[in-house]
Image (tube, helix red, strand yellow):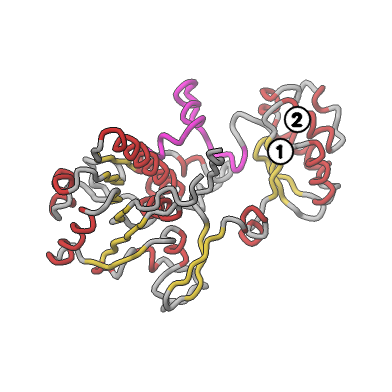
Amino acid sequence: MQKEPFKGLKVVELASVLAGPAVGMFFAELGAEVLKIENARTNGDVTRRWKGAMEDPDSPYSAYYHSINWGKKSVLLDLRKSEDRAMTLKYIREADVLITNFRKGSAAKLGMDYQNLKSSNPRLIQVNLTGFGEEDPTPAFDIVLQAETGYLFMTGHVGGPVARMPVALIDLLSGHQMKEAVLIALLQRERTGRGCYTSVSLAESAIASLANQASNWLNVGFVPQQMGTTHPNIAPYGDLFTTSDDCRFVLAIGTEKHFRRLCQAIELNHLPEDERFCSNRVRVRNRPTLVQLIQERVGQLSKDEIMKRFKARQVPVGIVRNMREVFELPIAQSLILEREVPNQGIVKAVKTAVFRIGDES
């Protein structure tokens, strides 16, 4: 695949926070020229100031900002000023793609509604992000959508408090929807020569990603409950275990073959024949007993020994790693982006475009 397939593509980003900027970074990684226009009245994207306890309070950027703004050129403009608005409109006239998160009515007030923009740039593709749809001006942040679309209700452990997902997953899911919309619009433009307006909402992106949890409700009326790391339909799947040297790991036993391999690996060969565990259906029903039996055996083995056994039999397993341990992995090291930022030095981010497409030959 061409290393920079979007080289020559011009993208203007008027969006802020995470979802829209993640789309801009996707195109920047793949060679597009991305201009991020930030609000001068607020000293730029609000994420510039979302700093952790270990960060320099005087730095112009936060680590959060760098996570989704790699590879862009940034300018601060005030769209309420006629000269800044005129400059922005000039950039948009020359753009292929415009990324926005305008709330209802705000684009028209600035003269930046799509009907006006396409009159001077009929090839323009605009993707606009909203919280709850084009007609609903309600402000929305990721945690609000986690609550409103069922995710928060399902998190945490049984009987305990709910837990926010540690990344802004709804923003990321929405960003993927936006990328898909732009890619389809670019394909359509190749065929027709015309751009178009596309819209994505955080709420619809979240609901569309409920997958099996939504299906469990829609088909059998089951309301998903808190289950910690475990899976409502599979066992042992997501259950946590601890080795003799305190390494925590999860299992993902999705087939009968996997279950037999697991039992062979930890020398519990009788379990697949036990009527309480002989099928996934009964394993789900008898999960607490099954987990206890596995933990008793696992607790006698070290991390190295248990992982050697699982690897030899291809048992699906994942070590619970902290962020330092994640970035010690070779696969993670290969995804680190670096660039030099004035007044800050070398900053790092993680690639967002990680697919690979084979050579044309």
Between 22 and 33, the residue placed more toward the observer is 33
Neighbourhood count class around disc 1 (C-alpha, 10 Å): few under 14, some 14–19, many 20 upward: some
Outermost residue, front side: 361
Task: Specify start and end residues of the magenta stretch as a single range.
Answer: 205-230
Residue in the image at 44% along x and 39% along y: 150
Kindly identify the residue that appears in the image at 71 percent across and 38 percent down.
316
Image position, residue 3 (x, y; %) = 49, 51
Q: Is residue 328 visible?
A: yes
Q: Which residue is mark 1?
A: 316
The foreground one among 55 and 189 is 189
Q: Considering only order in the chain, which callout, 2 or 1, is on the residue closer to the N terminus?
A: 2
**Which residue is more in the foreground, 205 or 352?**
352
Marks 1 and 2 in Cβ contact (< 8 Å): no
Q: Amino acid at mark 1?
A: Pro
Q: Position of residue 73 (x, y in %)?
A: 35, 64
For the residues carrying marks 1 and 2, which lies nearer the camera in this image?
A: 1
- Which image quadrant is residue 132 in? top left
* Residue to which mark 2 is pinned: 259
Q: Quadrant of the C terminus?
A: top right
Looking at the image, which residue is at 51% across and 61% down?
349
Image quadrant where residue 240 sits: top right
Q: Position of residue 336 (x, y in %)?
A: 56, 60
